Image (spheres, rainbow, N blue to C red):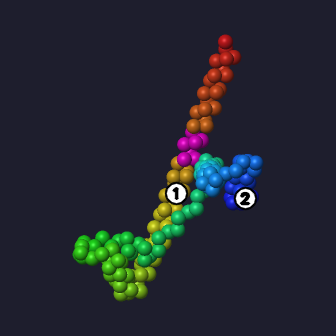
Amino acid sequence: MTTTERILTTFTSKVNMEKEYTRSELAKMLTEVFKEIREGEKGEKKTKKKAKKEEGGEEKKKRAPSAYNLYVRDTMPVVKEDNPEMSRQDLMREVGRMWKEKNRDDKEEDVKEEEEEDVKEEVEKEEVDEDVKEEVEKEEVDEVKKVGKKEKKGKKE
């Protein structure tokens, strides 16, 4: 059922067909129904997102910055320092012009650096995942030991 159908269904169920309403009364009722249904939808959407995170679902991975993005990130502060009076738009034009003038070999180096950075990020992520896994396993072992000790105490008594 679409949102519009839900709004109309709810609205018509709240209207007493035997009573005469003014236009403003009907508008007020419709507004209340609309807000009520919209708020319910927003709550559902947030809940789904939270549930996905809690279930261990992965969120969409951010795309790695391109060589140009990395160049802009590194060059912009230098250009801004040299030309503090320039607007943001003019600064971007200047950085774009500098990128175009940059020779092909330098651009290829930037691409290689970008690929190396991607590899480093992937390795770091794997290391973090391994650390988390080890920590969870350690906690599980500790929990099993605690349960074992409690059972032994219960048998002795």
Taking 37 as reference, is 83 left or right?
left
User: Local crowd at mark 2 within 10 Å, few (<14), some, or many (≥20)?
Assistant: few
Looking at the rendering, the stretch of residues picked out in magenta corresponds to 132-138
Q: Extreme top residue here?
A: 157
Relative to 60, residue 89 above or below: below
At which x and y percent is residue 104?
41, 86
Placement of 57 over or under 142, stated as above or below: below
- How far across and down, in percent of the image, does residue 81 sit? 25, 72
Residue 125, numbered circle = 1
Q: Secondary structure at mark 1?
A: helix
| Quarter of the figure that contains the C terminus | top right
Cα–Cα span, label 2 and label 1: 46 Å
Q: Residue at x 63, y 32 (%)?
A: 144
> Predominant secondary structure in magenta?
helix
Q: Nearer the viewer, residue 135 or 56?
A: 56
**Which one is nearer the viewer's eye here, 73 or 45?**
45
Q: Is residue 87 left or right of residue 11?
A: left
Residue drawn at point x = 38 percent, y = 86 percent: 100
Amino acid type at image mark 2:
Glu
Location of mark 2 (residue):
5
- Across and down, in percent, residue 48 comes to 64, 52
In the figure, is residue 46 to the left or right of 110? right
Of residues 97 and 93, the one drawn nearer to the viewer in this rendering:
93
What amino acid does circle 1 point to? Answer: Lys
Say if mark 2 contacts mark 1, CB within 8 Å: no
Report if residue 41 is visible in the image. Answer: no
